[in-house]
Amino acid sequence: MSEFHSLKISPDLLAVVQELGFERMTEVQAAAIPPLLEGKDLVGQSKTGSGKTLAFALPILEKIDPSRRATQALVLCPTRELCTQVAREIRRLGRRINTLQVLIVSGGQPLGPQISALQKGAHIVVGTPGRLVDLIRKGRFDAGDINTLVLDEADRMLDMGFEDDMRVILSEIPGTRQTVFFSATYPPSIQSLSGKYQNKPARITIEEPEDGKTSIQHVYFPAEQDEKPKILSILLRKRDPEAALIFCNLKASIADITQKLRHEGFSADLISGDLEQRERDEVLAKFRNGSVRFLVATDVAARGLDIAALPLVVNYDMPVDTETYVHRSGRTGRAGQSGVAISLMAAHEKSKMMDIQLETPIRFEPGQLGPRGQGPLEPRPADMRTIYIAGGRKDKVRPGDLLGALTGEAGGLDASDVGKIEIHDRFSYVAVAREVAESVIKKLAHGRIKGQRFMIKLLD
């Protein structure tokens, strides 16, 4: 990897980098900083912790004119916490730039002081999409002098329902700007934004190192059909994963398995083709946000599910073909994490295991249940519960509005108690810590969100 002194940056910036103990660039820095210094647009696909904040902060600081108090760079982040981290890093790197002003504008904080700070002048603004749109619509944010726009963790912002806000902001800023996307993944939604709002962007993808690539362990347990419910229960108790997807071949089986798991105290739900769209949305929202730990599904019902980073997949029934097994097991061990695919295998299903091993590099190993008494005796409840709010995008409700209501006077929650927020057209889901869910519902029942009253309920 290249050394920082090879970059065409000012002596003061280079001195700060050296003072902070940085000598050699990380892979993403070496790939991203040169084209950014040249003024090119860029899409960078890189995981968190790769040094990407410095990768975009150095080029921003190199271009800043401190004599002009106008906002010259805008960095969008999905959360207030990330805004704070990014702003802190920019200030550290820019500490030799006299009068440099870096301002955080985000939800969960009073709007008035942020407006006052903008009026005094901030060279670089780091903010959340919802709050930026509020300021734009109130005529309190002048984007006319911005020459660099960075969307940090762009895929996460889209997951949180910020797409409309992101498009408003992108449309507001002069077309001559340099536009930079950093994202852990590159879904079609990012491709669409890039195609519309970027000009011939450089594209960099930082691959996982060999020791960080996906690692899936394939394990089987002999189990005849009447033994499978008991063995599944033992496995889930002993392994105690945060979440798991349990596959069955027959639609008729999933309700029975889900009922048995619930009866034993497991946090479980099912997804099937019989569910109405509203019910399907609800189940998936609860599973994604940690309000349900175990989801039972058929292959057809699970097709197209947007679920990432599962630690465990269970084949309650062996799939009908090798391709289906590869697809099922591929839902664990994503994003550089290790995962486990467990198969409960009746005697007549062993031939399917042999076929998979013949047709792929996959190798199964026998599992061990271990002696009785090991592992948790009782299933743990899910860490979160889900609040349903009968207001969504078409009611002009944004994630920042919900976070503000939950952490403001009406809700009284700490931001750390709020999990994933999903905004749909006419309704929204918010995950909150289980231990505060009942109390916050009582408080919100008498409060308002964005000046409006919405029907609010806690989902089971």
Image (spheres, rainbow, N blue to C red):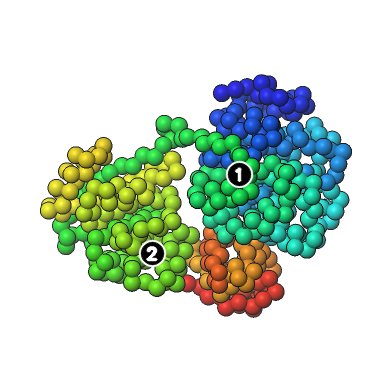
On the image, which quarter does residue 362 sit in?
A: top left
**Mark identifier at residue 181:** 1
Q: Is residue 291 left or right of residue 162?
A: left
| In-image side of 68 versus 103 (left or right) | right
Q: Residue at x 24, y 51 (%)?
A: 343
Using the image, determine if residue 392 lies above or below residue 188: below
Q: Relative to 292, say whether 460 is above or below.
A: below
Q: Nearer the viewer, residue 354 or 15?
A: 354
Q: Secondary structure at mark 1?
A: strand
Front residue of 209/234: it is 209
Q: In the drawing, what numbered circle is on residue 261?
A: none
Residue at the spot 56% in from the left edge and 58% down from the top edge = 160
**Mark 1 burial class by Cα count in 10 Å: few <14, some 14-19, many 20+:** many
- Residue 11: image x %, image y %? 77, 24
Q: Is residue 271 in view from this perspective?
A: yes
Q: Disc 2 residue type?
A: Ser
Q: Residue 123's spot in the image, x, y percent? A: 79, 44
Numbered disc 2: secondary structure: loop
- Along the horizontal axis of the image, is 381 left or right of 361? right
In this orientation, does residue 370 appear?
no
User: Total label count?
Assistant: 2
Residue 248 drawn at (x, y percent):
26, 60
Q: Which kind of residue does numbered mark 1 sit on?
A: Phe
Residue 23: x and y in percent read 63, 23
Q: What label does residue 267 carry, if any?
A: 2
Q: Residue at x 41, y 45 (%)?
A: 334
The quarter of the picture where the N terminus appears is top right
Q: Are marks 1 and 2 in contact (CB under 8 Å)?
A: no
Instruction: Determine whether 247 is above or below 355 in the image.
Output: below
